[in-house]
Amino acid sequence: MARRKPHPQRKAHSASASRTAPAPAAAKRPSADFTDSVMKQRLHAIPHLGSNAYLLALAAWQRGLKVTFHYEMASHCPRFAHLPFSGYRGEFLTIGDGRRHHAFYRVMGDRTTQQASAACESKPHTLDCWRQAGLPVADGQVIEVGHAAEAEPLLARHPQGRFILKPVAGTLAQGIHRRLSADQVRDLLNAASEPLLLEEYVEGTEYRVFVTAGRVVAARIRRPACILGDGTRTIAECVAHKVAQRRQHPVYGQEPFGLDEVSLAFLAQQGRSPGDVPAPGEVVYLNDIPDTHLGGDLIDGDDRLPSQAASIAIQATAALGLPHAGLDMLVCETDSVDAPRVVLLEANQNPYIQLSTVPMPGILPAKGNRIAESIIDDYFPSSVTRPRFPRASFDFTAICQMLTTGIVSEVSLPVLGADWVHERLTLPATQVDQAIVDRIHQVRLRHGLHVQLVKSETGDVIVDAVAPRERWARFCAQALPERAASVSTSTPPSTTTTPI
């Protein structure tokens, strides 16, 4: 993939905003609230790629669709029968509305054909599809082992340029060599032990663009590792502050960030040192590779994606025969803001959406669960106008644990009805003992209610329930009779929470 040098981002043409806005019917509906502490805790507890399936299931469940997680998919959907058993991670699920149902592997649904999926799994195949459709891609070709001479025509076409080499089937930016001279390309190709994709190196702003049903639903900019000055802290102190922030995020907390030899050398090239105090609002870059695995960020690009780039993303998704996709592309600055150069890089038919969904202070504002919700809108259009419970959640980790035991082959969530309510009761820590907790669980089981007990940092117990209104009233009367008058209702806690 080509990369960009850090530079201030120019405001793109305002027409792009309409292309990344929700569809009119969906725009009026509430989206999942991941600033809510109970919902945040449930999502942050998921340690693996199952978080994608959770976000999709949440989008369906909150609007009253039936969601079932399966240990295996072979007996439920031929489309995914070839996949190995990984249902214990909650990655196989079916969703239905009473008239139709669809199967999903993470966020990839059964309408994504195996042919379309295969086209995305091979970078050269993806690029060939786009070339045949007349869409813009970088000048490049696959160089087989022992055929380094075949790179000479491409190198000759860009005598003053730089190049990029990457594995044909690589992932997570592994094995990529950037900004290579022609001689460096020759040396690497002569020493290669696997086929490599050679491309011209293109400077530009790298976007991850999410397309569903012929519409851009979100755009994120990949920004290299950096800190934001406040006029008071040194660069080293700003780095430490950002490290502390990242630890609170379920994804960034797992990625490296700090002052290592590479970042110190990069600062020195800019004439900076860790003891410098950046001006308020000044962005100081620690490297120039926009990759989250190297400390980079995904920032909001909804209002920055040019309309031309949005149109190309839509065409690129259609050319691959995908109902939805995550596309990587470069937008290169030109003299005309309205007509930038756009270069398509690759497509993902089962895109990772958690990092583009979960808010991060100072990095990505809260925008709800709209990427997953757009997929559910497309598969179940009649559900778009259904009532929703944007702060209702479920314990995905417990579901995965049940599937792991092998005792059950599937787990279904309760189907939320039109007469259901989402309620919160906050019980002061001083009024809660094990006997009360046990009684709540017993009454919950007796009435078959979806009730979660969550403990805040202060020790208070939050009773979080989604239930038919009448059964909820009976639950309160039987489980909490002596506290019914003093308990607070429907108030989300503001502290970090843990399950009981």
Image (tube, helix red, strand yellow):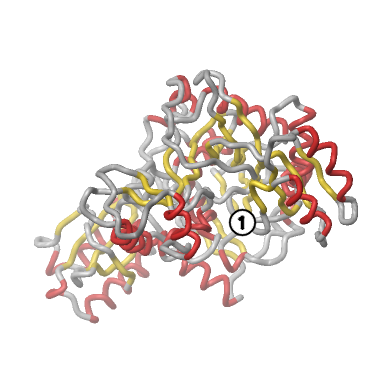
Residue 388 placement (x, y as % from top left):
38, 42
User: Compared with residue 112, is residue 459 higher up or lower down, i.e. above or below?
Assistant: below
Q: Secondary structure at mark 1?
A: loop
Name the residue rendered at 53%, 28% in the picture.
Answer: 333
Residue 157 placement (x, y as % from top left):
78, 32
Q: Amino acid at mark 1?
A: Leu
Left or right of 14: which side holds 89?
right
Name the residue rendered at 74%, 41% in the picture.
Answer: 116
Residue 60 placement (x, y as % from top left):
49, 46
**Foreground residue, 334 or 293?**
334
Mark 1, other Cα within 10 Å: few <14 / some 14–19 / many ≥20: few
Evaluate whether residue 449 shows in this view. Answer: no
**Foreground residue, 399 or 469?**
399
Q: Quadrant of residue 26?
A: top left
User: Compared with residue 10, is residue 433 higher up or lower down, i.e. above or below?
Assistant: below
Name the residue rendered at 35%, 43% in the picture.
Answer: 365
Residue 404 placement (x, y as % from top left):
57, 74
Q: Quadrant of residue 123?
A: top right
Quadrant where the image shows the C terminus: bottom left
Left or right of 216: which side holds 244?
left
Quadrant where the image shows the N terminus: top right
Name the residue rendered at 66%, 56% in the picture.
Answer: 171
Residue of label 1 = 172
